[in-house]
């Protein structure tokens, strides 16, 4: 997963005043890592505005994404952990602390990426491990170990 989740696409201790700012920050990490173009950021926000907050996938976790033709350069993800939660539209009772932005080149890659990430947050124990990581290196290593055992 190292090429899917590069170190420069991980940020811990981020601050955001709203869900859209958090999604934008997660998108900026995709851009910085060469995974997506700048326009992909607004495409992810537009997707939530149009289709709702179905991207809230687990307690405390959202996986924003959009279509590949909206600026995906290569398949990959970013990992953004917030110090204070944000609340997505219609999900005001579900505080979100972790955003894993997904950019996929095609539907197969999209499903594979979502599956790999879902495995990392599939149960309370796995999610607690991810949320307790204290460094970018620790997240990077954990995500890569998960990929090594899955595939």
Image (cartoon, grey):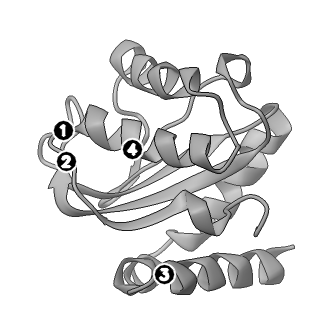
Marks 2 and 3 close (CB-CB < 8 Å): no
Marks 4 and 3 close (CB-CB < 8 Å): no
Q: Is residue 127 left or right of residue 90?
A: right
Q: Quadrant of the C terminus?
A: bottom right
Q: Earlier in the sequence, mark 1 or mark 2?
A: 1
Q: Earlier in the sequence, mark 2 or mark 3?
A: 2
Residue at the image position 73 percent from the left and 17 percent from the top: 69
User: Which residue is farthest top?
Assistant: 50
| The disc label shown at residue 88, or none | none
Front in this rendered view, residue 74 or 51: 74
Which residue does the numbered mark 2 point to in the structure image?
86
| Circle 2 SS class | strand
Q: Quadrant of residue 30?
A: top right
Q: Quadrant of the N terminus?
A: bottom right
Give the class, few, some or many, for how many residues have Cα within 10 Å of label 3's Cα (few <14, many ≥20).
few
Q: Is residue 87 above or below residue 72?
A: below
State the separation of the CA atoms marked 1 and 3: 26 Å
| Circle 1 SS class | loop
| The disc label shown at residue 126, or none | 3
Q: Quadrant of residue 84?
A: bottom left
State the separation of the CA atoms marked 2 and 3: 21 Å
Which residue does the numbered mark 1 point to in the structure image?
18
Marks 1 and 2 close (CB-CB < 8 Å): yes
Q: Earlier in the sequence, mark 1 or mark 4?
A: 1
State the separation of the CA atoms marked 1 and 2: 6 Å
Q: Earlier in the sequence, mark 1 or mark 3?
A: 1
Residue at the image position 76 percent from the left and 69 percent from the top: 2
Measuring from the top left, give residue 5's x and y in whole percent. 67, 62
Which residue does the numbered mark 4 point to in the structure image?
25
């Amino acid at each position: 997963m190292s090429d899917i989740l590069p170190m420069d696409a991980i940020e811990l201790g981020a601050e955001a005043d709203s869900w859209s700012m958090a999604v934008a920050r997660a998108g900026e990490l995709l851009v910085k890592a060469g995974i997506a173009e700048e326009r992909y950021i607004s495409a992810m926000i537009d997707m939530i505005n149009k289709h709702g907050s179905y991207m809230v996938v687990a307690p405390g976790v959202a996986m924003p994404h959009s279509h590949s033709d909206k600026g995906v350069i290569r398949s990959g993800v970013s990992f953004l952990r917030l110090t204070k939660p944000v609340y997505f539209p219609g999900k005001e009772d579900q505080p979100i602390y972790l955003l894993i932005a997904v950019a996929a080149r095609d539907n197969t890659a999209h499903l594979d990426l979502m599956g790999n990430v879902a495995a990392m947050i599939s149960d309370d124990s796995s999610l607690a491990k991810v949320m307790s990581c204290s460094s970018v290196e620790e997240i990077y290593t954990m995500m890569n170990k998960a990929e090594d055992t899955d595939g």
